[in-house]
Image: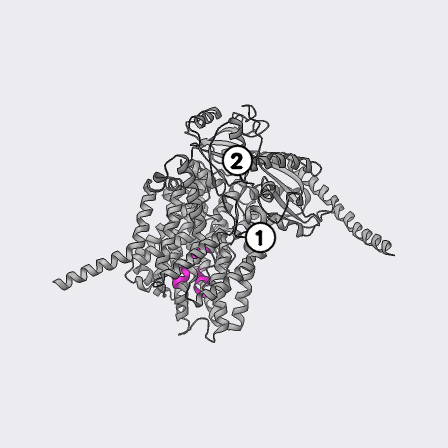
Amino acid sequence: MPGIEYLLDALTPINVLLALGGVIAGTIIGSLPGLTATMAVAVLVPITFTMPPASALILMGAIYTGAIYGGAYAAILLNTPGTPSAIATTFDGFPMAKRGDGDLAVTLACLASVIGGLVGAAFLLMLAPPLADVALAFGPVEYFWLAVFGLTLISALSEGNLLKGLIGACFGLLLACVGVAEISADIRFTFGSQTLLGGIETVSALIGLYCIPVLIDLVATPDKHLKVTHQPRGFRFLESVAISWKHKLNLLRSSVVGTLVGILPGAGGSIAGLVAYSEARRSSKRSEHFGKGEPEGIQATESANNATVGGGFIPTLVLGIPGTPPDAVILGALLIQGVRTGPNLFTSEGSIVFTFIYGLFLATILMLPVGLIIGRYAYKTIITVPKAMLVPTVGFMTMIGTYAIRNSISDVVIMITLGVVGWVLNRFGYSPSPIVLGLILGSIAEQGFVQAWTIGAATEDLVGMFFGRPISLAIIALILLSLFYPLIRSRWLGGTRRKVRAD
Amino acid sequence: MKTKQLAMIALATLIPIGSAVADYPSKPINYIIPFGPGGESDITARHQQPFFKEKFGQDMVISYKPGGGGAVGWSQLNSAKGDGYTIMGINLPHIIVKPMQKDVGFKTEDITGVYMFHYTPDALVVRDDSEFKTVQDVIDYAKANPGKLTLSGSGKGTANHLAQIRFDDMAGIKTTYVAFKGTGKAVAALLGNQVKAQWGYTSVGAKHEGKVRLLAVAMEERHRKFPDVPTFKELGFDLVSGAYRGIAVPKSTPKEVRVQLSKMIGEINADPEFRKRMENDGMALLDVDYAGYQAFMDDKIGIYGKAARDAGVVK
């Protein structure tokens, strides 16, 4: 193992304490909708000035990894992805919680997050410099196709209701255009309003579209928030381990997907979770149960999004190009400390990098006990608090959280508006996921398309630009597979059935 | 009676101001960056942070109000309390170009700048293994292949973009500018061979040493960190530009406080350790204080206004 001599440096009492404290703080912050890993890390930056670089990195890495996991609580128990990374966690997490398996879902998410985190960190340790090249091989056109691939997930997410899914996605794509355009600086769809100038912030849209309808329903119906069919049964740890062992391939594949997507600076945890989710669903024998409370769905998303932590550090440390938004803050803090990133960092400054990577392993392992205990506490609180307290508390939290993202009251107004719109649309059978997918992927697709088109037109090779690059072709193949898979499978199944009959 | 009352009120408001300056700052200062954390505006503010605490004994608390490429923050600047305890980062050419494009909730003259403390000079950047060794190589290639030379850069209507427009105009060439979201992604496109060159900053050369080369920098004199890289001026192009950063206060901030704050930022700028750290990151220091702010802006408004119109960013 490279840099094993630094393992002991990572295990000094102070580093262990920083990792533990970081994971606890991160998990709590991540569980509150609106408080993101990026903000948590940014708040810490001044404190890290006085620390040695490796310790500072361990603290920030621990907070980051804890926050990504913490996002699962709100997703499972409140149907609200606390961070965009946890969007796909809601698909099966909330149905599980509704039917009384919230404790199991939380424990499963914890196990999956730890495994994903470890896989991501292992890639960072072993293969960082060669994998960093992946980040560079991805040009604008590849991001465009990746976003289109993400959009094809809508067909999977809106089964039986493809038309409504597509309408929702178009609405999301339109929302993505609001405000000052990221690269062309055009101002679009603001209707002269200052409120819309900053655009629709993704996390506030998530809170609005997912959480507000749940709150309205809680007030409007006499049912309890989550059904509790049984006395709390501890962590349900062994049960979770058994389920995880059964789906170890899913966990491994999702972790690798998460690491690879994490390496791409333009993609991020939300796409990693969604891609892993759809792959898990495709290869599962129980694919028709996905979206109705299937543990495999949670495992895929949660292992993938925690794997992006290690993956995202690869371009950050090797190339000096942040893989994810929290990485950008961490990179800034390193710069101020006078640490120069680059391939040499792994050879000349091994004491910093490898101490940090082992620290990240440590933090990820500590996440197991921390996550289980906090998760259990969160579950108990949510099921025991009476509805008359739960609704105002969560409602208040959504507003504070939304405001905190950009210190902006406009975001709160947009969040509530989208929430009401989302609730009405829900009544008519439109689910929030296609809208959110359109919102997130719209800007990635647009940027990639405009850049690819500009470069292709300048070099007079538009066709070659869009259809002549090997990675693009591979993604296009995935898109076609994803679009036609239901057809292929039914054809294939039909074929074998016919054969059986012929025999 | 009325005048007497007015005089009383005036007096009452004046007294606290006088004392406010004497013990300013007596509590932490809120320093708002109208961008997200991790960007260069954040990093330079972070460089200032410890020096502020050391020199003036109060914390400089950095918070973020991103959105609309800075417009969300700047449009709210004047509604903050003008007591000197709320200050905001300002960036050029943003605060000049944005209000020209459309109504973004503020006008350039609404912003009360007290100090412009540094700029990150524009630079023409290529990969280390690039066929381009000099600026002349780039010009020759662009002349032989009009429009085919692709250059990445951060955003449109930005320092990078306006530098490209102005340079194309000065050199009589036509190149293709490809806008990316932020400098990091523009560098990734360069390193990944997606584009032939980049309109970046000197800080790109510092951050990615060994992987990129700077062909020229848009400065008056050579950058101390890159003594071998010529300025555009030496090569015969009058291009001195970059992303300028400064600090502004709400309009209601009394003049005494503005002057005092300007003096304080200047003191940080004069600190040799601060200068060294900034220059190591590839930045260039600038000392435009409160008294010089308006003249500085008038000059830049002329230059950037024309470039933005030429670029088609402003209709």
Residue at label 1? A192
Span of residues in magenta: A72-92
Question: Label 1 near label 2: C-beta < 8 Å?
Answer: no
Most foreground residue, A295 or A242: A295
Q: Nearer the viewer, mark 2 or mark 1?
A: 1
- Callout 1 environment at 10 Å: few (<14), some (14 to 19), or many (20+)? some
Marked residue chain, label 2? B
Marked residue chain, label 1? A
> Residue B11 at x, y = what percent?
82, 51
> Residue B109 at x, y = what percent?
66, 43
User: Does the magenta-highlighted stretch encompass residue B126?
Assistant: no
Residue B63 seen in this snapshot: no
**Residue B203 numbered mark, or none:** 2
Describe the element under mark 1 as helix, strand or loop: loop
**Residue B9 numbered mark, or none:** none
The amino acid type of the residue labelled 1 equals Gly
Query: Furthest residue to the right?
Result: B1
> Residue B305 at x, y = what percent?
60, 37
Describe the element under mark 2 as helix, strand or loop: helix
> Left of B280 or right of it: where is A99?
left
